[in-house]
Amino acid sequence: MSETTPETPEGQAPPANEWKPPASQEDLDRIITERLTRERSKYSDYEDLKAKEAEYNEYLESQKTDEQRRQEEAEKANTEREQERKEAADAKAELARTRAALKYKLTEEDLELLQFVPAEQVEETAEKISKRLTREVTPDFDGGHRTPPPATPSMNNIIRQATGRG
C-alpha cells in the first residue's frame, strides 16, 4: 500500500494555512494573546450598551405618569403582602404540626407523615397516627384465649433423663 498525500499538482507546495504546532512557549503565548485580543474586541462595546440601556430605562420611567407609578407601587406592595401571608400560613401550619406531634408523642418520622396534611386536619390526623401506634397487637388469631402448648423437651434432655443424669 502506498501512503496517501494531499493531492497537489506537481511542483506546488501544500497550502500555507495548514496548522503547524507552536515551536516554543513564546509562540504559544503569542497565539493565545492574539486569540484573546480578537475575542475581547467582540465585546468592547458592552459597557456602552449597558449605559444606553440605563438611559433608555430612565427615559421610560420619566414618561410614566404619577398614576402609573402609584399603580406599580401598589401592585408590588400587594405581591409582597401576599407572599408574607403565604409564609405566615406556612409557619402556622408547621407550628400546628409540631404541637400535635408533641401532644401525641409522635417521632420525627411520624411528623413527616403530617407534612402534607392541611393545617385544619393536623390534630385529627396526629391522633389517628398515635392510636395506630399504641394499639395492642394481638398475639395470634384467637386474641390470646387459648393457652399455647407446652414446650417439647429437646432430645438431649430426654436422653439425660433416661440415663439418670438430668
Image: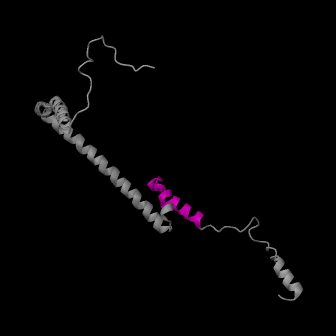
Relative to 30, does residue 104 appear above or below in the rendering?
Answer: below
The structure residue drawn at horizontal position 34% and vertical position 50%, both measured from the top left corner, is: 86
The structure residue drawn at horizontal position 30% and vertical position 51%, both measured from the top left corner, is: 84
Residue 40 highlighted magenta (yes or no): no
Q: Quadrant of residue 134?
A: bottom right
The structure residue drawn at horizontal position 34% and vertical position 14%, both measured from the top left corner, is: 7
- Give the colour scheme of this rendering: one colour
The residue furthest top is: 9
The structure residue drawn at horizontal position 50% and vertical position 65%, both measured from the top left corner, is: 107
The reply, left or right, for residue 142 in relation to residue 68 is: right
Residue 133, image x, y percentages: 58, 65
Q: Quadrant of residue 71?
A: top left
The residue furthest right is: 162
The reply, left or right, for residue 58 in relation to residue 103 is: left
Q: How many marks do you count on the picture?
A: 0
Q: Nearer the viewer, residue 57 or 104?
A: 57
Residue 127, image x, y percentages: 53, 63
Relative to 151, does residue 129 appear above or below in the rendering?
Answer: above
Q: Image quadrant for the C terminus?
A: bottom right
Residue 120 highlighted magenta (yes or no): yes
Q: Nearer the viewer, residue 159 or 60?
A: 159
Residue 19, image x, y percentages: 26, 26
The reply, left or right, for residue 149 in relation to residue 59 is: right
**Magenta segment range?**
110-133
Relative to 159, does residue 94 appear above or below in the rendering?
Answer: above
The reply, left or right, for residue 25 in relation to residue 123 is: left
Q: Quadrant of residue 163?
A: bottom right
Most frequent secondary structure within the magenta stretch: helix
